[in-house]
């Protein structure tokens, strides 16, 4: 959540940032936070004054008794009793103001960085990289303004893929390919659990496992320590990373035990550092985790949810960093390069978008989405969001570090990203790599899959 220092240092900037995120009632919310803080400070000052007066009177009681002034001593005792009652009232007022202030702050989103584009929706996101396209005309035909970088396939790989590709107009969507090659049974998933819970079979299951192992192997090479966390978390963990109260309706809740199924490994992994003070020389901390993820996706419907496009349960590898404010920008760039490297090795056409204020998550200060292009569905599919949360999550978590220079304790920066989410990666791999012999497996994935083709 936002810190009071942020608000006091530049109230106008905070309000402008919240308005960039299209947070309704930004002015009123910030004014109320400050009013409650004033109420708390006023109660604190009154308490301190009463406590000082009580201490002074208490010191006089012994002297009065020694002088035989029993009546005056009893009066002094009565005064200290009344002051104690006042102090208790002031404590209650302080607690009430703090509780109301924290409750309100938990409903206020993070403030976006200055480089976040203005905009109300995904239509206003800025494309900053286009990669892995086989030819320039295709780029010109399907990308919009904002591309500032271009990366293509290398040499003979480019020619080999071009020779194997089926004409785009003839490509089958992944749900038809899944049936053709007996990879995924969506109907069986409905029978067992419901819509959005597919069953992977044979080579489909092997492809899932291959991708998981490939992503974890690449994360290990990049210096990430693997974590195997629980896939259910308590309420404190949900509040710590900002899923609660913002996304409560999108999370599966086990009411009897008051536990939540995780929507992403970000939640348990980041909460490892809740209420922890880390020595500066231990930063940045780099963790990765493979988990199943669970999302209700309430309100999702239509063609965009068909097949693997939007699921209630799916596999994902998450990368998480805890860092200093001075180094978090460099950490974010390294994470972006890591995710981009995965897409290059999978030889998938991709683009990177800097999200607009209106399309960013509740907790992010800066977010880049990675999307792969589906040549059968003729549209972009999001496969990763890589975000810097600044101190927003750390303030909720009380995740801090001790500076080496002066031993002062201050809030960390937290960052995370999908590296990668599997369903739409699988969809794009199947759709984009169709050939006469079957479905081509990218070279980097072949050692993990154990073959060069799905037949």
Image: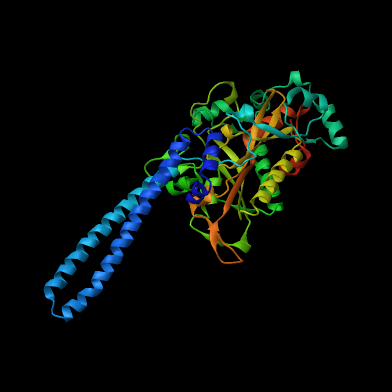
Q: Give left or right: position of 213 versus 62.
A: right
Q: Where's residue 3, x and y in %?
A: 49, 49
For image coordinates 20% across by 78% down, the residue present is 63
Q: Quadrant of residue 43?
A: bottom left
Foreground: 37 or 207?
Answer: 37
Q: Give left or right: position of 402 versus 137.
A: left
Q: Where's residue 421, x and y in %?
A: 62, 38
For image coordinates 56% across by 60% down, the residue present is 401
Foreground: 225 or 69?
Answer: 69
Whether residue 105 is situated above or below residue 282 in the rendered picture: above
Hey, which residue is sitting farthest top in the picture? 169
Foreground: 130 or 289?
Answer: 130
Q: Where's residue 366, x and y in %?
A: 61, 41
| Quadrant where the C terminus is found in the figure | top right
Asked if residue 29 can be seen in this view, the reply is yes
Q: Where's residue 303, x and y in %?
A: 59, 21
Q: Give left or right: position of 71 versus 176.
A: left
- The colour scheme used to paint the residues is rainbow
Foreground: 381 or 171?
Answer: 381
Hey, which residue is sitting farthest left in the picture? 71
Whether residue 187 is situated above or below residue 314 in the rendered picture: above
């Amino acid at each position: 959540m936002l810190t009071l220092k942020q608000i006091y240092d530049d109230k106008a900037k905070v309000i402008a940032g919240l308005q960039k995120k299209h947070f309704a009632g930004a002015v009123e919310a910030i004014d109320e936070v400050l009013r409650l803080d004033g109420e708390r400070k006023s109660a604190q000052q009154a308490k301190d004054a009463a406590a000082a007066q009580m201490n002074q009177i208490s010191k006089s009681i012994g002297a009065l008794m020694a002088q035989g002034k029993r009546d005056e001593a009893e009066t002094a005792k009565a005064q200290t009793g009344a002051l104690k009652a006042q102090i208790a009232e002031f404590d209650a007022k302080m607690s009430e103001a703090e509780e109301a202030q924290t409750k309100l702050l938990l409903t206020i989103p993070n403030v976006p960085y200055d480089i976040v584009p203005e905009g109300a929706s995904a239509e206003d996101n800025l494309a900053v990289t286009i990669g892995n396209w086989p030819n320039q005309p295709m780029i010109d035909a399907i990308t919009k303004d904002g591309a500032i970088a271009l990366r293509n396939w290398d040499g003979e790989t480019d020619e080999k893929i071009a020779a194997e590709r089926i004409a785009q107009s003839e490509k089958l969507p992944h749900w038809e390919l899944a049936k053709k090659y007996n990879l995924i049974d969506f109907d069986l998933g409905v029978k067992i659990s419901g819509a959005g819970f597919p069953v992977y079979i044979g080579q489909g299951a092997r492809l899932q496992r291959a991708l998981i192992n490939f992503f974890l192997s690449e994360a290990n090479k990049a210096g990430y320590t693997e974590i195997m966390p629980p896939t259910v978390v308590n309420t404190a963990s949900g509040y710590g990373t900002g899923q609660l109260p913002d996304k409560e309706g999108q999370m599966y809740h086990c009411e009897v035990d008051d536990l939540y199924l995780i929507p992403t490994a970000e939640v348990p992994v980041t909460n490892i550092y809740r209420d922890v003070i880390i020595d500066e020389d231990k930063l940045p901390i780099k963790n990765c985790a493979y988990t199943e993820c669970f999302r209700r996706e309430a309100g999702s419907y239509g063609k965009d949810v068909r097949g693997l496009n939007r699921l209630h349960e799916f596999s994902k590898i998450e990368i998480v960093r805890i860092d200093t404010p001075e180094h978090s920008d460099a950490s974010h760039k390294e994470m972006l390069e890591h995710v981009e490297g995965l897409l290059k090795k999978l030889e998938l056409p991709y683009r990177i978008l800097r999200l607009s204020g209106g399309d960013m998550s509740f907790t992010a200060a800066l977010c880049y989405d990675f999307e792969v292009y589906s040549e059968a569905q003729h549209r972009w599919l999001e496969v990763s969001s890589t975000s810097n949360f600044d101190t927003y999550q750390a303030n909720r978590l009380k995740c801090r570090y001790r500076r080496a220079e002066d031993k002062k304790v201050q809030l960390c920066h937290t960052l995370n990203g999908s590296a990668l989410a599997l369903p739409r990666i699988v969809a794009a791999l199947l759709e984009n790599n169709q050939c006469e012999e079957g479905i081509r497996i990218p070279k980097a994935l072949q050692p993990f899959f154990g073959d060069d083709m799905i037949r």
